Amino acid sequence: MLVGLLFADRSIAEDVRWFTAADDDQFVIDDPLAEERELRFVQSQPTRRGRPPATSLVDPGVRRPRRAPPSGTALLARVPGMFGDFFGGGRPVSGPNGGPKGAPPRGGAATRLVKISENYSPQPRNRIYTTYHFFNDVLDGSFGDVNRYAIGVEHLLWDDLSSVELRVPFAHTLASDQLDDPVSSKDTELGNLTVLYKKAIWTDEQSLVSTGIGVAFPTADDVRLFRPGDRRLVLEIENRAVHLLPFLGLICTPSEHLFIQGFTQLDIDTAGNPVRGDVMAMNLQPLGVVQDPTLLFLDVSAGYWMHDDPSSPWITGFAPIVELHYATTLNDADLIQQAGFLVGDLSRRYDILDFTFGMHFELKERFSLRPGVVIPLRDGDDRQFDYEVFLQANMAY
């Protein structure tokens, strides 16, 4: 009997050692006899040594279930929006022939033209946001430094596959009212309010395609140039153009951590801005209409989740992101030379190529902070600023 008990104890000990080393699948069963305790049924899988499976009733705390990795729509929904890069225009001139250079045909520079990819995602979502962009030495110093801001809200519509967004830009930049002395006055300027509609038209487990259109309304101030002596008005460029912004967006998630996205967009000036002037400041006469050239934007972005843990107490996600941005004019910009005035965009055409690097910090899965920098890759008329730094903040709801 003693020998039998020794062999039995040895067998039980081996089974316990084998059981603790096994990979387990478990599920909970009800115990009708227990008052405050549930039992967990464990089905043990064979080990590498080929031991047969065993079953046991154990306490609930044997193993903690692992968090399943995100997939499908959940994986796409976590892809951060793009950063963007665009300042907004070429090298403008307004004033009498031979007069000052730098007064913007689009007063409140950096607030008139809208780039879809700035703090924007191809996927519809609920969020509110604010952004800050600093542009150093804009257009070879003719604008100085420019600080641009934006606030906005995006809201899902009834089908959760589309959204509408309101974007409000403003900037501390060259003022819309200038003295011909030369042009140098700065002010905080409201830009053109923009409404964007976006709809996902195709999606699967790893990718999404969306399309939409934006409308930029002429809410910014008219541009006015005054004679320095008596401050009488000599030139006025009215802000009347409505811009249409059709776009196509794409998100692709080749793996749980890697994400790629891109946009292609047009900016179409539908009517142009009327110009009136009189070098004698007596009676302003119509000089024509200045129409912005049609712009084409091509943007691509790639990022990688280096940290992704919703259970973290503060930073639940971190991803570095790199982007390449190309913007080109599809036709020559207007240039009016009449009655002693030269009004328009001296660049006529430009091809801008910028590189963006930024970091996406996700806080508690609802908030994000996104610092970054933009470096122009071309010179001359194709270089709008020396460098740009930005900070973007988003809150999902």
Image (cartoon, helix red, strand yellow):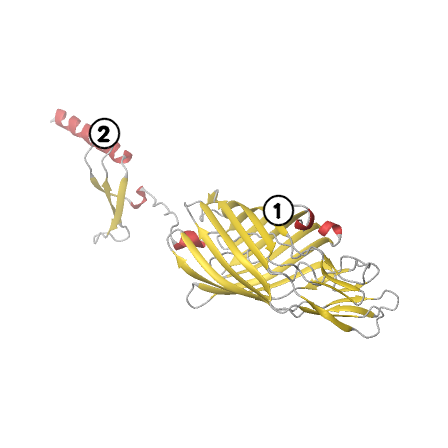
Taking depth in this image into account, of 187 and 107 the one nearest to the observer is 107
Q: Crowding near pointer 1: few (<14 within 10 Å), some, many (20+)?
A: some
Q: Position of residue 272 (x, y in %)?
A: 65, 68
Quadrant of the image occupied by residue 108 = bottom right
Mark 2 is on which residue type? Answer: Arg
Find the residue positioned furthest to the left. 1
Find the residue positioned furthest to the top. 3
Q: Position of residue 229 (x, y in %)?
A: 88, 66
Residue in view at x 64 percent, y 68 percent:
241
Residue in view at x 22 percent, y 41 percent:
56
Q: Residue at label 1?
A: 373
Taking depth in this image into account, of 339 and 121 the one nearest to the observer is 339
Quadrant of the image occupied by residue 328 = bottom right
In this rendering, the answer to whether 356 lies above or below 92 is above
Q: Residue at label 2?
A: 49
Quadrant of the image occupied by residue 20 = top left
